Amino acid sequence: MLLKRQNERVTGNVKRCIAADLRVMSSLQPELLTALQSIARTLHFEAGQAVVHEGERPNYVGAVTEGILKMQKTFPDGREHIVGLLVEGDMFGRVHHGAHTFSMEAATNTTICAFPRTRFESLIDAWPELEQVVLLDILDELDRAREWMLVLANHRTTERLAGFLVVLCRRWANVAKLQNNDEQNPEIQIPLSRRDLAHFLGARPESISRAFHALADDLHIRIKTPYDIEILDLQELIGMCGLEDFAETAAFEYRPSVSR
């Protein structure tokens, strides 16, 4: 079933998007940043709102500035499967041609920096470095898809959940969203309901709950609330899910954030 989209809202207490603040665009030339800023607008979506329908071609290219978007695919029999998450700094929107082959929904309250598609395409044609930014973002998305494939290749739900937590630690590190200053025991906030997480990991919600408690019983994690998890043994989680190379990447070194 396709999501029924509410109108996106621009709210007065949402910070105006600044192109130069976007992680993927921060290194662009000042003249290009000025051109991007002149066409940028801020969109706000509440949790549960549809952002893009499957098969739709939005009239803008977006970058997440706050919150999380989930990408999902609807099968002919009505089943839905979450195929990825977009966090702060991630871009979305097809340029020049093509419609989205999946829908996108705000998993949390989400703010998007939106650029009208035709004007963004004109800037790409005029500025090769912007085209490179788009290409690099696509390659990053492919890398993330490969990581999720490795996670889902695990047979046990506990191993898949361990992989999800490891990947989430790195993604949160890249946007400074880890919840404390203890590098040994980072805390992360789960951005999905148990039902959505089950769809994401190809399991049943009750299996996901059992997997959380199994990891807690083995002292790999501490469940502070259903959505706030403290990582007690990150190396063990990495070994469980088969992502040993993960820990060797520089991107895995995280920057602790300030308290919520």
Image (cartoon, rainbow, N blue to C red):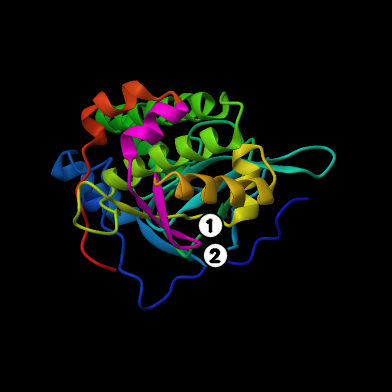
* Residue stretch in magenta: 220-241
Of residue 142 and residue 20, the one placed in the foreground of this image is: 142
Residue 108 in picture, x, y percent from top left = 49, 61
Snapshot quadrant of residue 27? top left
Q: Is residue 53 left or right of residue 109?
A: right
Number of numbered tags placed on the structure image: 2
Q: Is residue 150 above or below residue 171?
A: above
Q: Is residue 193 left or right of residue 239?
A: right
Instruction: Let me know if residue 114 appears in the view.
Output: no
Residue 40 in picture, x, y percent from top left = 35, 56
Q: Amino acid at mark 2?
A: Ala
Q: Residue at x 35, y 23 (%)?
A: 244
- From mark 2 to mark 1, how far is it between C-alphas? 5 Å
Disc 2 to disc 1: CB gap under 8 Å:
yes
Name of the residue lying farthest toward the bottom: 12
Q: Residues within 10 Å of mark 1 (few under 14, many from 20)?
A: many
Residue 204 in picture, x, y percent from top left = 70, 45
Instruction: Let me know if residue 136 appears in the view.
Output: yes
Indicate which disc, 2 or 1, sits on the residue closer to the N terminus: 2
Q: Is residue 217 above or below residue 14?
A: above
Label for residue 47? Answer: 2
Snapshot quadrant of residue 179? bottom left
Q: Residue at x 29, y 33 (%)?
A: 130
Dividing the image into 4 quarters, which one contains the C terminus?
bottom left
Q: Which residue is mark 1?
A: 107
Element under label 2? loop
Q: Amino acid at mark 1?
A: Ala
